[in-house]
Amino acid sequence: MYLVFNIICKKIYYIINELLIKSGYLIMKKKILIFIITYKAKHRVVDVYKKIPFKKLSKFDCNVLISDDASKDDTVVFIKKIQGKKNFKNINKKNLGYGGNIKKCLNFAKKKKIDFAVMLHGDGQYHPKYIVKMFDILKNNEKILAVTGSRMIYRKKALKGNMPIYKFIGNIFLTFLTNLISETKFTDCHSGYWAYKVNTFNKINLKKITNGFNFDQQVRLNYIQNKFLIKEIPIQTIYGTERSSVHLIYAIRYFFELILFLFRRK
């Protein structure tokens, strides 16, 4: 009896809620998703989560997804320790790749009817303090469909943030070439700090985008070719002492993949 009563009350609530929204008497909070992608990030992921400014995000309907890409260390153990309302966890049974893991998070966002989604990295390379600004830009600007964090607007600060010199030079060179090819004026085409309007991915076929490290760059090219507006904001550069697995040879291969991708899309 109680169960039936509960179901009826919920239905009445949703009907009244929709009528109030349509009449303009009630403004629903935008539904946001903060998704943290992890791979061998046991020493950082909890700290990344704790730095999320939840109090400042109270104006939104806030959801969190932590998605681990089949880490071979104890990352999953640390993820399970993270508790909170509207927290979701995904543990990939096999490694999907950097882009594959992001795709899973974006498909989750689409399924949950999220308005805006932001990506954090479990290694702490991107500070969560910029999330509020990114979401505010998306909320207040209809034409802006994505916001990215740029470490290179103030280049001297990038070096002070311990960005390796080879990455610093490589970023400038590859960003210059990307801008030249696509006729844009970005300062950091290789940032992994993105906030999206999720409905944009109804117009972009994620299946055609790589599962590898080039995911962010290929998404950027899709935005450019569809004339979707991307806004850059300056962010702090954070690099730890760990060595990156993405070496120079990979960066060279990545650039040629971008060129081929551009020709395929024409």
Image: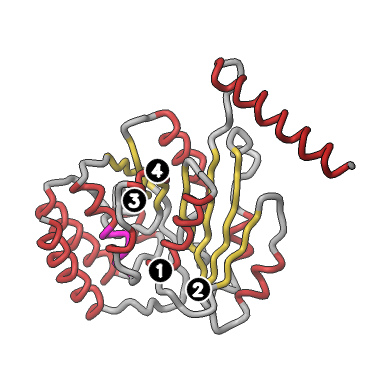
Q: Earlier in the sequence, mark 4 or mark 3?
A: 3
* In this view, the mark in front (4 or 2): 4
Looking at the image, which is closer to me, 203 or 86?
Answer: 203
Q: CA distance from mark 2 to mark 3?
A: 25 Å
Residue 152 percent coordinates (x, y): 30, 53
Residue count near mark 3 (Cα–Cα under 10 Å), binned few <14, some 14–19, many ≥20: many
Please give the label number shown on residue 150. 3
As drawn, the residue found furthest toward the bottom would be: 72
Q: Main secondary structure of the magenta part?
A: helix
Q: CA distance from mark 4 to mark 3?
A: 23 Å
Q: CA distance from mark 1 to mark 4?
A: 19 Å
- Secondary structure of residue under mark 3: strand
Q: Earlier in the sequence, mark 3 or mark 1?
A: 1
Q: Is residue 250 above or below residue 157?
A: below
- Secondary structure of residue under mark 4: helix
Which residues are drawn in magenta? Answer: 213-218
Dots 2, 1 in contact, CB < 8 A: yes
Q: CA distance from mark 2 to mark 1?
A: 9 Å
Residue at the image point whose x is 18% and y is 70% from the top: 257
- Secondary structure of residue under mark 2: loop
Residue 100 percent coordinates (x, y): 40, 68
Dots 3, 1 in contact, CB < 8 A: no
* In this view, the mark in front (4 or 3): 4
Q: Is residue 212 left or right of residue 260?
A: right
Residue at the image point whose x is 63% and y is 36% from the top: 58
Please give the label number shown on residue 100. 1
Q: Which residue is mark 2?
A: 69
Q: CA distance from mark 3 to mark 1?
A: 23 Å
Looking at numbered disc 1 in the image, what kind of residue is underneath it?
Gly
Q: Earlier in the sequence, mark 4 or mark 2?
A: 2
